[in-house]
Image (cartoon, rainbow, N blue to C red):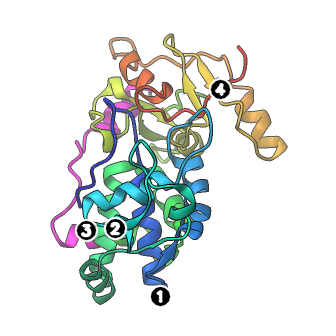
């Protein structure tokens, strides 16, 4: 499914994809018609969690209105709405509207759970890292789906994502199967486990499967990295978001990492590239990190 997102370079714009996931979830629960107020209340926390941070508030009205250009969303009576000077509808009028998926799409999704799973997976793969898929599915209300189920459906239709199968082993070997943040390593019977190979620049945004774009991490740190709870300076020191919160133990563990240098890979292996670090950290690029950071 192709969606025209408002990208500036590699900057992420998952606003339309998140609206589509909400609409599909509601459709599968028997609600095709969604009024603007409902969309606004459902979409804003998703944008806060999964879209690049903004200086003000995220505006659900933008994907609600502009998704129509992809022929994937309809707002009855849109052509008659009074417009502001810039061509956007007047908010009082827009708030009185409702929107829905086109009838042909809705019928197709309702007729085939397999098709719905494939469409959902295509949206997730194109805009989010795998570590966040189950969280997003739960957040939009697709609790009957899991990333493994939708991936199986996708694979059955020959739509498996192309990744270099060597990436995981190359990254873990480069960091000696230790977490690049904490140094954690676990082994049993000669096999290492407890660490994952994380992309710094997401695979969904054409991040390459190379050691320069990878880090070995404990699973929780991997998910928090992909969610933007922490990032890196150009000289590879850890930056923790000032917005990060949680239990006392979690806050103590994560905030204690702030300002610490990453472990370097084995001699002869490349350091993680500043190009990919900046994509993760800077809102002008990928905008994953939830700025501002704690003070160094």
Q: Nearer the viewer, residue 47 or 270?
A: 47
Q: Secondary structure at mark 2?
A: loop
Q: Report x, y in % for residue 18.
A: 45, 58
Residue 278, image quadrant: top left
- For label 4, the residue is 292
Q: Report x, y in % for residue 29.
A: 49, 84
- For label 2, the residue is 73
Q: Nearer the viewer, mark 1 or mark 3?
A: 1
Left or right: residue 280 versus residue 92 is: left
User: In the displayed structure, would residue 148 be above or below residue 237?
Assistant: below
Q: Report x, y in % for residue 160.
A: 22, 59
Q: Nearer the viewer, mark 4 or mark 2?
A: 2
Q: Report x, y in % for residue 27.
A: 43, 81
Q: Does the rendering let one see residue 147?
A: no
- Does 203 lie within the magenta span? no
Q: Nearer the viewer, mark 2 or mark 3?
A: 2
- The residue range painted magenta reads 152-175
Q: Nearer the viewer, residue 110 or 124?
A: 110
Residue 37, image quadrant: bottom right
- For label 1, the residue is 30
**Spatial CA span between label 4 and label 2:** 34 Å
- Does 171 lie within the magenta span? yes
| Tag 2 and tag 3, C-beta contact below 8 Å | no
Q: Residue at x 56, y 65 (%)?
A: 95
| Tag 1 and tag 4, C-beta contact below 8 Å | no
Q: Nearer the viewer, mark 4 or mark 3?
A: 4
Q: Earlier in the sequence, mark 4 or mark 3?
A: 3
Q: Secondary structure at mark 4?
A: loop
- For label 3, the residue is 154
């Amino acid at each position: 499914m192709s969606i025209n997102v408002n990208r500036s370079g590699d900057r992420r714009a998952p606003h339309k994809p998140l609206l589509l996931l909400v609409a599909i979830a509601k459709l599968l629960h028997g609600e095709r018609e969604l009024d603007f107020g409902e969309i606004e209340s459902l979409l804003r926390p998703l944008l806060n969690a999964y879209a690049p941070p903004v200086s003000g508030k995220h505006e659900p009205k933008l994907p609600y209105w502009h998704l129509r250009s992809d022929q994937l969303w309809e707002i009855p009576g849109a052509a008659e709405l009074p417009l502001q000077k810039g061509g956007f509808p007047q908010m009082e009028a827009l708030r009185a509207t409702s929107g829905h998926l086109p009838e042909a799409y809705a019928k197709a999704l309702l007729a085939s759970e397999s098709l719905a799973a494939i469409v959902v997976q295509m949206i997730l793969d194109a805009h989010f890292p795998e570590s966040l898929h189950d969280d997003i599915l739960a957040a939009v209300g697709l609790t009957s789906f899991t990333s493994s189920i939708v991936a199986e459906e996708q694979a059955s239709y020959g739509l498996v994502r192309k990744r270099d199968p060597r990436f995981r082993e190359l990254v873990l070997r480069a960091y000696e199967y230790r977490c690049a943040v904490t140094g954690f390593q676990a082994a049993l019977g000669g096999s290492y486990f407890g660490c994952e190979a994380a992309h710094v620049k997401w695979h969904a945004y054409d991040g390459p499967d190379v050691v320069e774009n990878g880090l070995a991490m404990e699973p929780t740190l991997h998910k928090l990295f992909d969610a933007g709870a922490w990032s890196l300076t150009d000289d590879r020191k850890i930056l923790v978001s000032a917005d990060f919160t949680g239990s006392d133990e979690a806050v103590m563990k994560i905030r204690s990492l702030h300002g610490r240098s990453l472990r370097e890979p084995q001699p002869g292996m490349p350091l993680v590239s500043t190009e990919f670090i900046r994509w993760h950290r800077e809102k002008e690029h990928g905008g994953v990190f939830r700025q501002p950071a704690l003070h160094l």
